[in-house]
Image: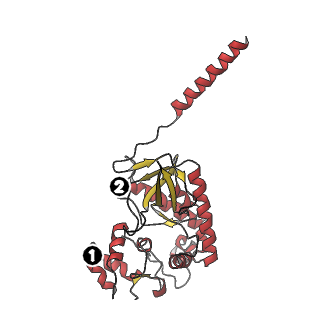
Amino acid sequence: MLQRGILLFWALALLNMAVVRLDATPPAVPAPGWVALDYWQLQKDGPLDGDSFCVVHNSQRYEFQLYFVDAPETTRDRLDLLGEQARFFGLNIEETLALGQEAKSYTESFLKGGSRILTRWERVGDPSTQPVFYAVAVRRQDYLAEQLIARGLGRLDASEPETSWYDGLEKSAFWGRLQVAERMAKNNRVGLWHNHPDDLLTFLSPEELPAGYDSSPHAPYNHPSPAARINLNYATERELQRLRGIGPVLAHRIVEGRPYTRVEDLLRVPGITDSTLERLRPYVVVER
């Protein structure tokens, strides 16, 4: 009787294992040009904040930066970027740093929960420096960039891949999901958006807007003052990518084309047309 009970126990256990395997969804195959990293170790001694991290995979160390999202800085090492983030969200430096730490903690927790990293080995920034690659991080059906944006721990960033990482996944549809997530975070005044000057005004009808408020579309900033404009001679590639129509390639070309003596000098950058220049003109400035 005891022996029969033991056999029955193992039979049920094996049956349960079989059911789990049948129910489990096999991992999707990356699209051509993409590589999936499924087994890796997060490195605490490398870069780690809301939108960047370092891992070891197959004994090789890699640094990644997320597509689609810009999370607040966690230190004062980049005061130019930290200051721009604080101004954009209407926060002070300490508030911005605190939210940066919150984003860092969330990213660490998300990654440790078992995530797949997808990359096409597109490099960030200057090719002569330590290589950093853009990536997408996904856990089951959740994307790290989307989760950060939905929690108000990051804002939409213009950095996006040229192709979708999975066949059948429409990149434009995913971008729409991110826009919805950001709009909801703004509407709910969570995280970085709790003090944003444009917050609830975007939901009011024209007759409800405050006197003198300009309700015309703004992109990507709300009529910035000269002090808030992006300086073409000093902006980082990530800052330049926040300008509508400026992706990683154009941002790198703009940096390589320095110095500039006037905004019109952008026309010498391959890919910058007259119409591009006119669209960018209200949001950039040249100072040396």
Q: Nearer the viewer, residue 76 or 69?
A: 76
Q: Secondary structure at mark 1?
A: loop
Dot 2, how many residues are within 10 Å of its Cα: few (below 14), some (14-19), or many (20+)?
Answer: some
Please tell me which residue is depicted at 70% across the width and 13% down the height of the picture. 3
Residue 283 visible to the viewer = yes
Please tell me which residue is depicted at 32% across the width and 73% down the height of the picture. 253
Q: Position of residue 11 (x, y in %)?
A: 62, 19
Residue 190 visible to the viewer = no
Q: Position of residue 40 (x, y in %)?
A: 51, 49
In this rendering, is residue 258 above or below 242? Answer: below
Relative horizontal placement of residue 246, taking residue 136 as reference (left or right) = left
Q: Earlier in the sequence, mark 1 or mark 2?
A: 2
Q: Position of residue 100 (x, y in %)?
A: 59, 68
Q: Nearer the viewer, residue 185 or 43?
A: 43
Colour convention of the picture:
secondary structure
Dot 1, how many residues are within 10 Å of its Cα: few (below 14), some (14-19), or many (20+)?
Answer: few
Amino acid type, callout 1: Thr
Quarter of the figure that contains the C terminus:
bottom left
Please identify the residue farthest to the front as the structure is shown: 59
Q: Secondary structure at mark 2?
A: loop
Amino acid type, callout 2: Thr
- Numbered tag placed on residue 163 in the rendering: 2
User: Where on the picture, by quarter, is residue 43?
Assistant: bottom right
Task: Say which residue label 1 marks.
Answer: 273
Please tell me which residue is depicted at 27% across the width and 76% down the height of the picture. 273
Quarter of the figure that contains the N terminus:
top right
Q: Nearer the viewer, residue 282 or 79?
A: 79
In this rendering, is residue 67 above or below 219? Answer: above
Q: Which of label 1 and label 2 is nearer to you?
A: 2
